[in-house]
């Protein structure tokens, strides 16, 4: 009998301790109060976390990220991508690696900021990075996640020079572009990626700033259009230039703002003026945005009393849903016909 049980155990599929397999791609936009932490889980159970939220604060963001990883059924992270070295993005990388295994860390290389705080932040990250493998991101590189095409389009202040498949069209908005002052900070060195799952496409450019966004879409749009746009830099005015937002033509946008960070009325207006926009979601109600905020049903957190996430579930045909964990309501978006 014991031998029979062992044979049956070997023949049956695994207990799926990492995750109950599903057909779609799940993306969790975690509330880290105006930082970033976005978890991707593929149908095969592989995973990638982009950024990690703020450190400290009695482990507020660390626990939120770990709770979401657990809820997704994961016991490890295959990849942890750090867009840049600011504390609201890289702050918990080492702490996460101390709690669960991380296979590969992805970043743009050394920090360009030299203050004592910046050096300490980077040194702390390097200690965490030493627990796994390291991938130095370069424009054009791909992150080898099974079933998911993750193409690096910006890193270390550089960007792709060849258009992605289906992209490369002239951008008429370039004629009206006005540059801002050059940004010497880590923001301008953000690792940005276009992420495709079948016909579903989304873009995450970290905190890439205005002038660097322009380089991606002028004179020609090197990125093409997307179904989902994670608003760059939390909806701050230093990013989200109309020249790129309107070129991307997102069908749905998600703004990872906090109550008092990001969510500027100007950035919101740029998104809302995008041709073909079907939905615009916020992680937080922006206190200073007033009537520019979206309706409450499309906001995950109305205050700071709880931490609700937005979850996107995408199918290979390009259709997807957005679920507001506060309201438990799900909105469906059909596959694009463009």
Image: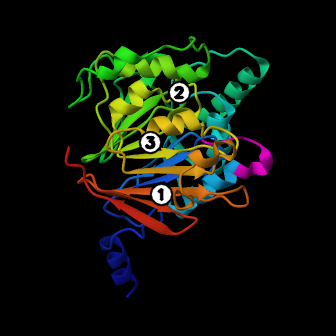
Rendered position, 4 above or below 93 = below
- Spatial CA span between label 3 and label 1: 21 Å
- Spatial CA span between label 1 and label 2: 24 Å
Rendered position, 32 above or below 104 = below
Nearest to the observer: residue 292 or residue 333: 292
For marks 3 and 1, the one nearer the N-term is 3
Q: Is residue 129 magenta?
A: no
The mark found on residue 239 in the picture is: 2
Q: Name the residue under label 3.
A: 272
Q: Is residue 166 left or right of residue 35?
A: left
Residue lying farthest to the front in this orientation: 291
Give yes or no for contact between labels 1 and 2 (Cβ–Cβ under 8 Å): no
Q: Mark 1 points at which residue?
A: 311
Q: Which of marks 1 and 2 is in front?
A: 2
Q: In this view, does 282 lie to the left or right of 35?
A: left
For marks 1 and 2, the one nearer the N-term is 2
For marks 2 and 3, the one nearer the N-term is 2
| Residue 144 in view (yes/no) | yes
């Amino acid at each position: 009998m014991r031998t029979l049980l062992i044979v049956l155990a070997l023949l049956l599929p695994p207990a799926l301790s990492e995750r109950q397999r599903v057909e779609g791609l799940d993306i969790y936009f975690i509330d880290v109060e105006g930082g970033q932490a976005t978890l991707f889980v593929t149908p095969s159970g592989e995973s990638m976390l982009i950024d990690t939220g703020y450190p400290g604060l009695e482990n507020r963001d660390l626990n939120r990220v770990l709770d979401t990883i657990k809820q997704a059924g994961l016991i490890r992270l295959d990849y942890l991508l750090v867009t840049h070295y600011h504390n609201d993005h890289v702050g918990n990388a080492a702490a996460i690696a101390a709690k669960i295994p991380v296979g590969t860390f992805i970043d743009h290389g050394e920090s360009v900021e030299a203050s004592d705080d910046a050096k300490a932040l980077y040194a702390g990250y390097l200690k965490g990075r030493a627990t796994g493998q390291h991938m130095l991101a370069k424009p054009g590189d791909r992150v080898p996640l099974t079933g998911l095409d993750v193409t690096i389009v910006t890193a270390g202040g550089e960007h792709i020079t060849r258009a992605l498949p289906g992209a490369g069209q002239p951008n008429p908005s370039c004629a009206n572009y006005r540059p801002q002052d050059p940004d010497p900070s880590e923001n301008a060195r953000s690792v940005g990626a276009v992420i495709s799952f079948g016909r579903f496409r989304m873009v995450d450019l970290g905190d890439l700033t205005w002038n660097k966004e322009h380089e991606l879409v002028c004179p020609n749009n090197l990125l093409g259009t997307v179904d989902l746009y994670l608003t760059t830099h939390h909806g701050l005015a230093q990013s989200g230039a109309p020249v790129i937002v309107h070129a991307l033509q997102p069908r749905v946008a998600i703004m990872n703002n906090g109550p008092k960070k990001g969510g500027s009325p100007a950035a919101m207006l740029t998104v809302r003026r995008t041709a073909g926009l079907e939905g615009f979601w916020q992680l937080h109600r922006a206190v200073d945005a007033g009537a520019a905020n979206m309706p409450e049903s499309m906001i995950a957190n109305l205050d700071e009393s709880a931490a609700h996430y937005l979850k996107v579930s995408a199918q290979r045909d390009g259709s997807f849903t957005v679920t507001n964990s506060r309201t438990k309501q799900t909105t469906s978006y059909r596959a694009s016909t463009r």
